[in-house]
Image (spheres, helix red, strand yellow):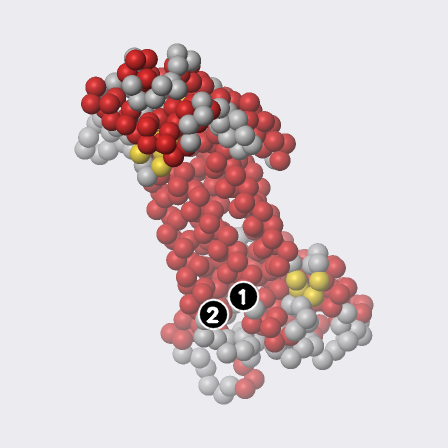
Amino acid sequence: MPKGKNLWGGRFKGGVDPAFAKFNNSFAFDRRLFEADVRASVAHCNGLVAAGVLTTEEADSIKTGLKAILQRGLAHGKLDEMESEDVHSFVEAQLVELVGDAGRKLHTSRSRNDQVATDLRLWLREAIDELRTQIRLTQAALLDLAEQKRDAVLPGYTHLQRAQPILFAHWCLAYFEMLSRDRERLGETRRRVNVMPLGSAALAGASFPIDREIVARELGFAGVSRNSVDAVSDRDFCVEFVAACSLIMVHLSRLAEEIILYSTTEFGFFQLSDAVATGSSLMPQKKNPDSMELVRGKAGRVFGDALSLLTMLKGLPLAYNKDMQEDKEAIFDAFDTTFSCLEVSALVLRNMELNEKRMREAASRGMMNATELADYLVRKGTPFREAHETVGKVVVRAIESGVELSDLSLDELRSFSNRIESDVFESLTLEQTLATKSRTGGTAPERVAEALAYARASL
């Protein structure tokens, strides 16, 4: 690295080995903080003016230079062509080149330690907002599909065994609820991100009378950090963000798994359109759900980002350590991966067809109304545990006869309990099985309609 291009050369007589310089430099990835760094530098400049460190003329020159650097970097893709130790060194070198000695004064009462912590929080705040917006769009895709297919019925499973029938819209709303929690979690994380560490300097605090609260307000922060040592060494907010991304990916991976399963010939409930599927290079008949398989696979990548951060932080002494340079790639990757997976999941939901006939047939077979028969007996005065045992015996009879419960005759059913009457057959219909689940949160059509309306209003 040419002498004078870094921010710390005065202590050193010799040059840095090129191999170490390459290993040490972070500009290849932390240049994503470029806009945040310029923005924070402008606010710091204003703080220095108020503290009497910079004159108004010097500040005007600095801010004009920063504006030019920002416009040049964004408009022409100059960042891709440039080399520097990190984004902070890059901005300062460009500034000094443009405005001279005034640019050298900007770093007064500031360290790269509080500078990067501030930049990262500014970037992450916007990233969270973008992610929450994309979650809403994915939720909207779920709702649109649920509203279009509100009469479709799907077998509900436990242990991947048919359990009880549910409305397809109820299934969609389950994922809607997961994503609602994800959106809420990100909002909570954002509140802790929105604290300004600038003014903590390297670790001991600023030496000049900069009003941190005024600088924080200019940058849109809700408050300032209360301990300078903690401020420059804190990466809890990074872990929280990636943990929140990890849970989003858990939910998307579960959605992906079900779409993949239900798109197989064995289930045959869903079919993906050509827009979100691929074929086989050997087998002409194949239509593969690669879109959802990639979502499922990329979940592990985000989990790895979370583990990387936790492992990097677990043994660090206070305050800042160069290890923390490793936080950015994990955060950037978690954001990029989670955002793209939300985007693709929404695309798949908008390009998916249902085989409603097959879904209804599956929801009507396999003794899925057995619990309804037990509930029927309870309504007739039988204790539930006794009703459960009785229905278990009825199920055995139906299996041995190769029929469904509703195919057994009234006499056969009464041989297990004299409380069973002719109205039992109405209770065993698919429609009645759904309708009885009428408490809040249940799959009864009227409850699902209310839930859909509530979900739509929440967006």
Type of the residue with mark 2: Leu
Specify whether 377 is left or right of 366. right
Q: Residue at x 62, y 35 (%)?
A: 458
Q: Quadrant of residue 158?
A: top left
**Residue 72 seen:** no
In the picture shown, does residue 97 fall above or below 438? Answer: below
Read off the residue under disc 2: 313
In the picture shown, does residue 155 fall above or below 16? Answer: above
Q: CA distance from mark 2 to mark 1?
A: 8 Å
**Residue 399 seen:** yes
Q: 375 and 261: which one is in front?
A: 375
Specify whether 343 is left or right of 374. right
- Element type at mark 2: helix
Type of the residue with mark 1: Arg
| Label ID, residue 235 | 1
Q: Residue at x 80, y 74 (%)?
A: 52
Marks 2 and 1 in Cβ contact (< 8 Å): yes
Q: Position of residue 257 (x, y in %)?
A: 35, 39
Q: Earlier in the sequence, mark 2 or mark 1?
A: 1
Q: Position of residue 82 (x, y in %)?
A: 50, 62
Q: Position of residue 215 (x, y in %)?
A: 74, 64
- Element type at mark 1: loop
